[in-house]
Image (cartoon, helix red, strand yellow):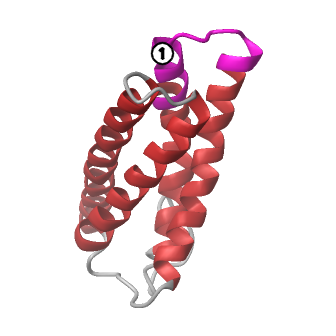
């Protein structure tokens, strides 16, 4: 039981570390593209997402899940599909805030897209990354049971 808890703790910490690094890249690039870059909120978010997603895959593949890494293009493609689902959550938060609620400042866009949206998308990404991308061949079921 202790080994299992230790593995889960290591996985969560590794995923969080990779996610924080990707988040920093996403946030910095989004802020630049939305401000000095002069791009609209959705275009800026889409480009910053691509950069952050690539950082997250690399960190998870070579760090958190290095012992489960599958070779070939499949894990990379599935990772991007999982992250597209997470991005849809982020973009929905941004679109609702910016276009639906009328909060159009750079700060409001950053909070809705890179804070609230990112938090909700992280749940989607963690589940998808561990169950669809870096599956442990010996594991059956969810990480909770």
Q: Residue at x 24, y 67 (%)?
A: 3
Residue 4 seen anywhere in this rendered image of the structure: no
The one nearer the camera, 10 or 145, is: 10
Residue 113 in magenta stretch: yes
Could you tell me residue 22's position as x and y percent?
33, 48
Q: Estimate the x, y position of residue 111 in percent, counting from the top left.
A: 48, 19
Query: Is residue 118 something one can see in this rendering?
Result: yes
Residue closer to the observer: 88 or 33: 33
Report helix, strand or loop for mark 1.
helix
Q: Is residue 105 above or below residue 45?
A: above
Residue 11 percent location from the top left of the image = 31, 60
Location of residue 116 with respect to 20 vertically, above or below: above
Q: How many marks?
A: 1
Answer whether residue 11 is magenta in the image: no
Q: Residue at x 32, y 72 (%)?
A: 61
Magenta region? 98-114
Residue linked to disc 1? 106
Q: Whole-percent x and y of residue 62?
A: 24, 72
Other residues around mark 1 within 10 Å, as few (<14) / some (14–19) / many (≥20): some
Residue name at image x 23 percent, y 67 percent: 63
| Displayed quadrant of residue 69 | bottom left
Q: Residue at x 32, y 58 (%)?
A: 55
The N terminus sits in image quarter = bottom left
Q: Quadrant of residue 27?
A: top left
Q: Nearer the viewer, residue 74 or 12?
A: 74
Residue ranking furthest to the bottom: 71
Q: Main secondary structure of the magenta part?
A: helix
């Amino acid at each position: 039981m202790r080994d299992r808890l230790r593995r889960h703790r290591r996985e969560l910490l590794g995923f969080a570390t990779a996610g924080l690094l990707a988040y920093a890249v996403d946030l910095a690039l989004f802020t630049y593209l939305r401000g000095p870059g002069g791009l609209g909120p959705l275009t800026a978010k889409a480009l910053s997402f691509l950069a952050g997603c690539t950082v997250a895959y690399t960190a998870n593949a070579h760090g958190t899940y290095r012992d489960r890494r599958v070779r070939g293009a499949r894990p990379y493609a599935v990772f991007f599909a999982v992250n597209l689902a997470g991005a849809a959550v982020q973009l929905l938060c941004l679109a609702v805030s910016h276009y639906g609620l009328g909060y159009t400042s750079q700060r409001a866009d950053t909070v809705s897209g890179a804070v609230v949206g990112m938090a909700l998308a992280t749940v989607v990404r963690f589940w998808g990354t561990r169950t669809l991308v870096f599956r442990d061949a010996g594991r059956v079921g969810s990480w909770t049971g």
